[in-house]
Amino acid sequence: MMKGGKKVFLVFILSTVLLLSIFSISSCTALQGIKPLPTEPVSDSTKLEPSDPRYAVELLAATETQQILEQAMSLGFAQKSFGFSTKQVNLDELPFDPSEVLSLLDGYEAFVKKIEEYLRAGAKEFFNHPNRKNYIIEVHGARKQKIFELAKKINPSISEPDKLYFDYRDFTISYGVLASLYYFYNVAVQNKNLAKAWEEVAESSGTALVNESAAQLISEIENELGKDPFALNYELLRNKFNQLLAIGNPKDFLNMVDVFKLEPFKLTNVKEVLDSLKWLVNSYLEIGDFENDNNIVTDKGFRKDGKETFTTLMAKAAETEECFVAKTVLEEPVDANFKINGKTPIKVKDILSELNDALPNKKKVDITWELILPVVTQESETEATTTLNLIMMYDFTKMYKEYIDYRDNNIGVKRGFFDEVFNDSASYIKFVLVLLQIFSGQEPTQENLEWLANLFLNNVPMINIDKQNKKVTLKFAYNNNYTLNDDMMKIELTASIDDAVRAIPSEFRAKILREFAKSKIYEYMDKLNKSK
């Protein structure tokens, strides 16, 4: 959407907004009898607790932060996460790689707990305070020195300022860094546990992740399918599949709800997350207003009163000429093919303004984006282009609930699929044969191709094929209360059928072909023809 290095800065800032939205900051509605924010300078004698908004200074000045930053720099991704320079960031990379964060924070669980306590207390008080934009405090002593050392790790030649301050912008950025560590650590832990669970699923259907009823039925189905196709009990198979479909809702649709237990697919605190996101989108727009206020900052983004703050110090360490967190990004142009709620935004600010209206009012957000992407064919290494149409939808009215069940999605197969494929040996063998021909690059007969296309069109909700225009659409959606086609949020991708087939990894194709070869499908097909 944006050009050059500024795009990276947008990725960093918007990622910070997203990360902050995950921890449980309550709604930003005004509180009755709210007390003033503490304005006393932070000195060596100041005892800071997680309930104090200034505790961010304590965490940034902690020895653990120094050690984590050193380790992050050794891993080669610290500049993406902590620095303000956009010159050294790979455009294709996110600010953090969750797979690396677990090793990065190994042994720092107690520090991560401190961050969590602060995000749920002191940060909450700051973000809910009506006078937060005018907030500024001075930092003295050892904490000031430790924070300066953070800047020196980015640029060893930077000079130490006589005085150091924290203002509204600094606290927001500080929370972003701290929340990044906290959130990605938890994501990494969850990913590790989930990956372990999937490994268990791959090894045996008797894993603790699979419910007992499904495990028993899957085992019985696998045993039956291991027989000669002509010896299969197709009525038995249809009945077993129907029993499997009926475990969860919808009753005529086989998906994750039928197979897996709720844990670890349960996302909790959803209301709190959305309330947080509601304020944080507004907050980012507020930072833009802050940086556009000529009474506070210069045309380069530094404070007009000359006070050195955490943000300006880091900007100088990165040797940037400007110190803008939001102002420049909000003015970035948007791809003309990008639309939100039917409107064509001109600037990034227009996108966030739509979200800022949708979140507090619990509206639906629709996003469409036509992307022109390079394609390298396997037959030749010449580069061509293809058009990919992206659609995203978030219905915040439906998303406001106690928890979201990740299993409740449209990935699955309707009952009609099993009834038709396992109708008899001829149907089953034809199904396997047509798939074999497609994966091996052979051309199925038009009749068989039409049959397979209709089979998927009628029974696999996440796939839609436009035969006339030769387009294929993949749709992933979370359902609303286990009701298929009542989408809570969705992502749709539409591309040409030829490009979609080419996108299938060659290793995957080879594996499929090996499995088909084991099934001796050609021998069975020949046997079927002779029996007619």
Image: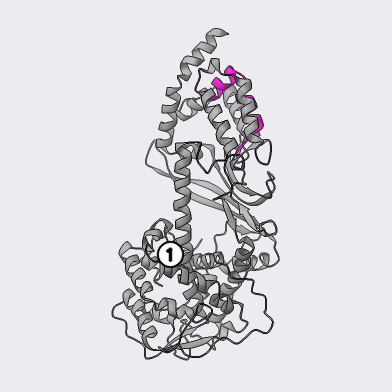
Q: Where does the image place residue 5, in percent across and percent down from the top left?
A: 42, 66
- Magenta: main secondary structure: helix
> Is 267 or 15 nearer to us in this picture?
267
Q: Vertical placement of 33 versus 18: above or below? A: below
Q: Secondary structure at mark 1?
A: loop
Magenta span: 410-432
Q: Is residue 196 above or below residue 129?
A: above
Of residue 523 and residue 320, the one placed in the foreground of this image is 523
Q: Residue 44: give x, y in percent of width and height.
A: 40, 88
Structure colour scheme:
one colour
Residue drawn 66% across the image and 30% down it:
416
Task: Please state, as top left, top right, bottom left or bottom right, where the C terminus lies in the image.
Answer: top right
Task: Say few, some or many: other residues with alpha carbon within 10 Å of mark 1 (under 14 / 14 to 19 / 20 or more).
Answer: few
Instruction: Tell which of 149 and 61 is nearer to you.
Output: 61
What residue is rendered at 51% in x and 11% in y? 527
Residue at 36% from the left image edge and 69% from the top image edge? 68
- Look at mark 1 in the image and give the residue it sits on: 4
Q: Position of residue 106 (x, y in %)?
A: 37, 62
Residue 201 falls within the magenta-colored stretch: no
Residue 355 in sight = yes
Is residue 423 visible from the viewing direction of this image? no
* Relative image position of residue 367 (x, y in whole percent): 62, 56
Q: Residue at x 70, y 48 (%)?
A: 486
| Side of 285 where 189 appears, left or right | left
Is 436 located above or below residue 204 in the figure? above
* Amino acid marked by disc 1: Gly
Q: Is residue 421 magenta?
A: yes
